[in-house]
Amino acid sequence: MTVPNLPDHYPPPPRQTANPAPPRPVDSLRRTTSIDVAWPDGPESQRLFVGRARDYLTGADGTGRTLAEGEFSLRMTEDKTITEIAADPAPEAIGQLVGARAGGHLRMTLREIMPELIARADPLYLVLDDLSGTALVSAFAWGQWYPERMELLRRRLGGDEDNPVLAQRANVCWGLREGNSGVTGTSLENVADADAGHLRNPADPQGWHAFAEHDGPGFRRARRIDVTRKDDLIRIDSAFQDSAKLREGGRVAIHEYNLAATVDAESLEVLSLEPEARILPFRECPGAVHNLARLVGRNLAQVREDVLEMLRGPEGCTHLNDALRALADVPRLVEGLRQPA
């Protein structure tokens, strides 16, 4: 693939959170998901992943109730192999994930052994699908507590002749296109220095499910999807954030996007997509938002396949693509709006 020459100078990457989440709209359905990662036995031990997801219906008077929820807990080795897993409610095939490794193959395995979760847009599927991305990014959490580990990570990622990790990943996404600062190692300082804020809005304590909390370093991937319908128009307001705990308290974010969309309720044609890059690690990363226009006019129910086909590799951003793929569940979420709150 030939990658065009890119400008030498960019503005600094965005570093301003949109948190807290807005209060739940009336007559809406909100899906929230989170995966919290901890190292209960130290940095060289297996990681503990706790994923939680909830669908919450809000009526015309602002009161709400839970429509569906799911949770998993698993252990994972340094090479991303799942060694144990439990879920509630537990799909019959959940045990088949033991021995699998987080990555693209894990997503294929999920589709093969748990197609029923996809068919009914089960909230548990979204957090299981998010395991691969979470496993890849979560290691940066240790560097927020132990600077020497962050320095080691910078040396490993920064084009080291003996271990040029990011150089090997050139063109896997827009931000890591060949020649970009994230590949050459010229902007690895302070890739995560943005205040993550607080997800939960004090004015809307029911706006998020309960998070898994652990002592010591920790990582969290969190998603929110608000869905409303008026007449023949579906409106979507979604958000995504990767963050880590700070030793002194609070959290620092490395990735955050907001994404708004409108969809024809009958045909499911995507009428508009408005991405907003809030926090990103490298100066070139925000450019990925411009290619989303390719999805306007497509069918929302096919967005998982369209993203893989149209925004593959350096044509898209891994994290923004995940935010888009999650919208494939919206048609089923809209059905939940018909239930009484």
Image: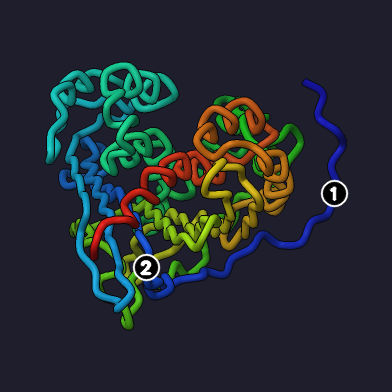
Left or right of 190 in this view: 83: left
Where residue 8 is drawn, which disc sits there? 1
Q: In this picture, is 92 found above or below 250?
A: above
Residue farthest bottom in this picture: 203
Badge 1 density bin: few <14, some 14–19, many ≥20, Cα 10 Å: few
Under tag 2, what secondary structure? loop
Q: CA distance from mark 2 to mark 1?
A: 48 Å
- Residue at figure coordinates x 19%, y 57% from the top left: 214
Of residues 71 and 119, the one drawn nearer to the viewer in this rendering = 119
Q: In this picture, is 231 found above or below 33?
A: below
Of residues 331 and 111, the one drawn nearer to the viewer in this rendering = 331
How far from the left and from the top, in percent, is residue 184? Answer: 70, 38
Q: Quadrant of the C terminus?
A: bottom left
Under tag 1, what secondary structure? loop
Say if residue 301 shows up in the picture. Answer: yes
Of residues 110 and 265, the one drawn nearer to the viewer in this rendering = 265
- Residue at figure coordinates x 34%, y 36% from the top left: 131
The amino acid on which the numbered mark 2 sits, given as a three-letter code, is: Asp
Q: Which residue is mark 2?
A: 27
The amino acid on which the numbered mark 1 sits, given as a three-letter code, is: Asp
- Residue at figure coordinates x 56%, y 41% from the top left: 267
- Residue at figure coordinates x 76%, y 61% from the top left: 11
Left or right of 147 in this view: 247: left
Q: Quadrant of the N terminus?
A: top right
Q: In this picture, is 24 found above or below 171?
A: below
Q: In this picture, is 56 found above or below 172?
A: below
How far from the left and from the top, in percent, is residue 80? Answer: 32, 28
How far from the left and from the top, in percent, is residue 77? Answer: 26, 29
For residue 212, which quarter of the picture? bottom left
